[in-house]
Amino acid sequence: KNEVEQSPQNLTAQEGEFITINCSYSVGISALHWLQQHPGGGIVSLFMLSSGKKKHGRLIATINIQEKHSSLHITASHPRDSAVYICAVRSLEGGADGLTFGKGTHLIIQP
Amino acid sequence: GAVVSQHPSRVICKSGTSVKIECRSLDFQATTMFWYRQFPKQSLMLMATSNEGSKATYEQGVEKDKFLINHASLTLSTLTVTSAHPEDSSFYICSARAQTASYTFGSGTRLTVV
C-alpha cells in the first residue's frame, strides 16, 4: 500500500520567511504532484515532478527518486501563500491511475 | 491552461434524494476523469476512475450503486449520489487528466445532506 507522509502538518511563519514542506512516499512512482488547496476547497496544481527540480516564481519543488522524498520551498513568503499544500503521487504499482494524497500541510503566513 | 469546471459548488439536499455533480473539461479532451472525496481535515481519497465510453472503476469500499458515474463524452463526467444520507456529506472533487499526464482539478462540490 502506498503511503504518502507530509511534514509538518501545520506551519505558521512570518511574512518573508523561507518555507519548506516535505513529502515522503513508500512505493515507486511515475510522478509526484504538489497541489495548493484554498480555504474554499478549490485545488490548484503547482508542480508535476518525476525528477530533479522545478521553479515557478517564488516556488521551488525538488524530488529525490532514490530516497522517495520531495520538498516544496516558498521563498519570500507572503500572507497570500496561506493555504493547504498537498503532495500527491501516481504509483507505478498495479496500473494505478489515480493519485494518492498526503494529508496536507496547513500553512499560515502572518504579516 | 487546462480548465475543469465542476458544478454545483455547494448543494444541500434532503436525506433520500439524489444529487448530480458535473465535471467538465473546458479546453481539452480528458480521456480519464477521477472522482475524489475529502472529509474534514482528511486526505483526498480516490473514489473512482472514469474512462470515456466505459464503466467506471471503483476503489475498494466505494459502493458503485450509490455513487453512479457517467463519462459519456471526452469532456463531461457526472457523479450522482443516490439516496443520499447525512454520512455522504463531504467535499467531492473531480480531476481530469490530459495527454500530458498532468491533472487538472475542478473547484469541488460541498455536499450537505440534511
Image: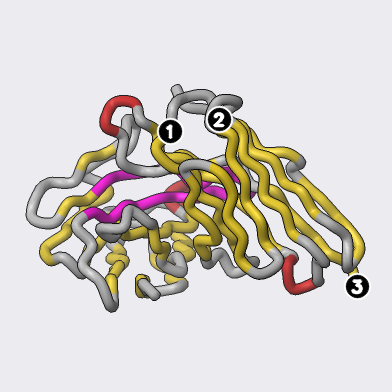
Q: CA distance from mark 2 to mark 3?
A: 33 Å
Q: Which residues are magenta?
A: B32-49
Q: Which mark is residue A25?
A: 2
First of labels 3, 1 by sequence position: 1
| Residue A111 disc label | 3
The residue located at (36%, 72%) in the rendering is: B2
Crowding at label 2, few (<14), some or many (≥20) Cα neighbours within 10 Å? Answer: many
Q: Is-magenta flag for residue A95?
A: no
Foreground: B114 or A96?
A: A96
Residue B40 in magenta stretch: yes
Q: Amino acid at mark 2?
A: Tyr
Going from N to C along the chain, the mark reached first, 2 or 3, is 2
Callouts 2 and 3 in the same chain: yes
Which quadrant is home to the C terminus of chain A? bottom right
Tell which tag, 2 or 1, sits nearer the viewer: 1
Q: Give the amino acid at mark 1.
A: Ile
User: Which residue position is annotated with label 1?
Assistant: A29
Does the CB distance between marks 2 and 1 fall below 8 Å?
yes
Q: Position of residue A45 (x, y in %)?
A: 50, 61
Identify the residue shown where x is 66% and y is 69%.
A57
Chain of the residue on which disc 3 is drawn: A
Q: Is residue B99 visible?
A: yes
Disc 3 and disc 1: Cα gap in Å?
A: 37 Å
Give the Cα separation between the discs numbered 2 and 1.
Answer: 9 Å
Picture residue at 55% right of the left edge, 25% below the top: A66
- Image position of A73 (left or right of A68): right
Name the residue nearer the viewer: A30 or A51. A51
Locate residue A17 relative to residue A60 in the image: left or right. Answer: right
Give the mark count. Answer: 3
Q: Main secondary structure of the magenta part?
A: strand
Are labels 2 and 1 on one chain?
A: yes
Q: Residue at x 38, y 56 (%)?
A: B102
